[in-house]
Image (spheres, rainbow, N blue to C red):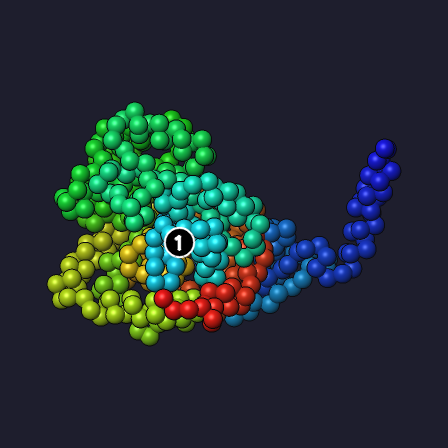
Amino acid sequence: MNRFPCVSLVAVMLGFAVPQMFAQTPGATGAVLYEGARLITGEGGAPIEGSAFLVQAGRFVRVGRKGDVQAPAGAIRVDLTGKTVIPALVDAHSHIGYMKNLTSGPQNYTRENIVDHMHRFAYFGVAASLAMGTDFGEMPYQLHDELMAGKDPDAARFLTAGRGLAPLAEISAANMHHATYVVTTVEGARADVEELSLRKVPIIKMWVDTRGGTLKTLTPDLYGAILDEAHKRRMRVAVHATELTEAKNLLRAGIDIFAHMISDVDDELVTLFKQHPNTSVLTALGGPRRIVSAPWLNPPNALITETVRPEQIKRLQDRLAGQTPQAVQQGRDAWDRLARTVRTLSAAGVKIGVGTDGGGQTGDQFVGWTMHAELENLVAAGMAPAQVIQAATRNAAEILGLTDLGTVSAGKSADFVVLDANPLDDITNTRRISKVFLRGHEVDRAKLRAGFIPTAMPTR
Ligand SMILES: [Zn+2]
């Protein structure tokens, strides 16, 4: 059968008839011009007051001042006067699919629960998050491909580090390390990394932590083999390591990403970072910080009550209220040291990206919310709001290798958050979310909200 006549007909329609027919209809070009907002581009520098940016086919096409940015005929115009726009946030360290109401563990790790978590991220203005070494099975890889392709327009991008690599002492049946590769030999470590490379995982995760001298962790020959094999295969390595001595050894061995803030800092550490300028650090301050201060919990912020069931909120309130004075003092000491590391590394020009450890198995680290708590934590540690926003947008996107996220600039994916107030005045204004856009699409936050806390759900 000769199909050319049909092709010709389509070509004629596409080439001539269709554009002319729709050019008179507003929005038929798919172009939308957002005008009037204060725009924080994420690239550093002062915000653009009275901005305009053009979005077409899911991307930023032009970014500048209102009146300077031209739009094609038929473009829809959206007035954002009085609002502040920031790039969509990126959380570079999460544990996705484990937490579900009052339980957290492998039994909750289903496709539906991961999708629910990615909806939560989107709801909170987070465009992407990396599950840090706690995924297992085939499903997360398939889901990654689907969500990265934008098959669910209301879901954030799900990135996976696949199965992490850990010493035997880290692993128990019920914790999130149950699915890790157990590293005991150099040959085994190299084979594990090779397997992850076949999955095209860009970043892998390993644990190097003696937990205060209580357990036997990976030795330098083992983590050195992981680093060497990963780098040969053009993958980067993120490490859970918080102890100062081990952090120095890991820097000397060529570590790419610290998944947590290092618990102490001295001149030698700063020098090693300067010798390794491509090594970056994620924040993960939430656990220690909320022992000291969690003003968002009493009363709970509206974003929490909209997404977390009352009994889970109460459990965290009770946990924090029931801490012993000794635990509070330990938390305060830990926080003071972490804050000093944040200030010192930030001042030294080390790339700091936001990674919250949200969804972790202990302590109700509410998925999505941890991002907004972390921004406040970083300001409390001594960073300026503009630096903090950059850490949560451009830096985190760069660390994850997401070249089309992190800033509002021409060519990037149109992922942005419209806020009712300016976070440069008060960082907690990132919580005053008016709208969230992913790939140019406005996330249906009302629909998502209705699904987070189903009214007919039985209590556990
Ligand atoms: Zn973690």
Quarter occupied by residue 161: top left
Which residue is most to the left?
A: 326
Evaluate whether residue 61 shows in this view: yes
User: Residue 188 at x, y = what percent?
Assistant: 30, 27
Location of the N terminus by quadrant is: top right
Q: Residue shown at 36%/50% (left/top)?
A: 106
Q: Is residue 94 left or right of residue 83?
A: left
Q: Quadrant of the C terminus?
A: bottom left
Which residue is farthest top? 187
Secondary structure at badge 1 equals helix
User: Total of numbered circles in the picture?
Assistant: 1
Residue sitting nearer the eye, 175 or 405: 175
Which residue: 59% across, 63% down?
35
Instruction: Answer few, some or many: residues within 10 Å of disc 1's Cα (few below 14, many 20 plus, some between 14 and 19).
Output: some
Disc 1 beta carbon < 8 A from ligand 1? Answer: no
Q: Is residue 378 above or below residue 177?
A: below
Quarter of the image for residue 222 reads top left
Query: Looking at the picture, which amino acid does disc 1 mark?
Result: Asn
Residue that mark 1 sits on = 108
- Across and down, in percent, residue 375 comes to 35, 60
- In terms of depth relative to the viewer, which is nearer, 272 or 10? 10
Q: In which quarter of the image is residue 430?
A: bottom left
Q: Tell me if I can see residue 336 in this picture.
A: no
Residue at 78 percent across and 56 percent down: it is: 22
Residue 62 or residue 169, whichever sits in front? 169
Q: Relative to residue 340, is residue 118 drawn left or right?
A: right
x and y percent of residue 421 in the render? Answer: 45, 69
Residue 235 position in % (x across, y down): 40, 33
Q: Which of 49 and 92 is in front in this view?
A: 92
Residue shown at 57% from the left, 55% from the top: 153
